[in-house]
Structures are given as C-alpha cells and as structure tokens.
Image: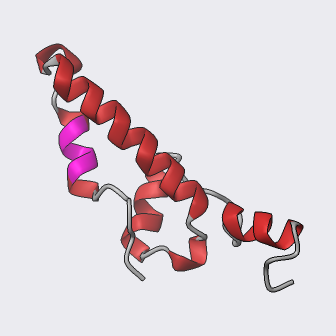
Amino acid sequence: MADTGRQSLTDKAGAAIKPDSQKTTTEQAGDSIKGTADSVASTFQPNSDKSATQKAGDSVSSNSNHNDESLLTKAKDAVGLGSK
C-alpha cells in the first residue's frame, strides 16, 4: 500500500540537515506543516499498512503508532460502522 500523505525519508532528512538559522520563514513554516501532516498521517495509518521503509522512518523519528488498527478504524468500530 502506498504511504499516502507521508513524507519520504529523503524529505525528512533534507529538512533536518539544514539548520533553522539558514532557512527562510517560509521554509520553516513548510517544514512545520509537513511534519505535522506526516505525524497525523502516521497516527491514522495502521502499522500493518505501512511500508518497511516508513515503519523504519517512524521508529527513528518516534512517529510510530503502536496500534495495529488505525484510529479511523477504531472510531468506526465504536459507532457500529466498522467490521466489528
């Protein structure tokens, strides 16, 4: 499954290598928005649907969810719209 909405490891590394002091305000804001979006996507994507590369990147960046089910699936199950 594709890691839709996720930053590649190359993008993450590129943002981390350049010091904030050398970034424009626009670059800093973009990094912040992308990082937040990636964190949200990590939370909603079940670990079983992540590629090996994305799992490795999440574990290194402490961006890993430890559930096998996504939060969306849990919410659907809670209101009776899921498979459980």
Foreground: 73 or 42? 73
Instruction: Name the residue at 49% across, 56% down.
Output: 41
Q: Is residue 38 left or right of residue 43?
A: left
Q: Is residue 17 above or below residue 41?
A: above
Q: Is residue 2 magenta?
A: no
Q: Is residue 3 left or right of residue 9?
A: right
Residue 29: percent from left, percent from top: 28, 26
Instruction: Name the residue at 28% across, 47% down.
Output: 12
Q: Quadrant of the C terminus?
A: bottom right
Q: Is residue 55 left or right of residue 18?
A: right
Q: Is residue 44 above or below residue 36?
A: below
Magenta segment main secondary structure = helix
Residue 39: percent from left, percent from top: 49, 47
Residue 66: percent from left, percent from top: 68, 60
Q: Is residue 16 left or right of residue 53?
A: left
Foreground: 10 or 77? 77
Residue 4: percent from left, percent from top: 38, 68
Magenta region, residue range: 11-15
Q: Is residue 25 above or below residue 72?
A: above
Instruction: Name the residue at 59% across, 55% down.
Output: 43
Q: Quadrant of the N terminus?
A: bottom left
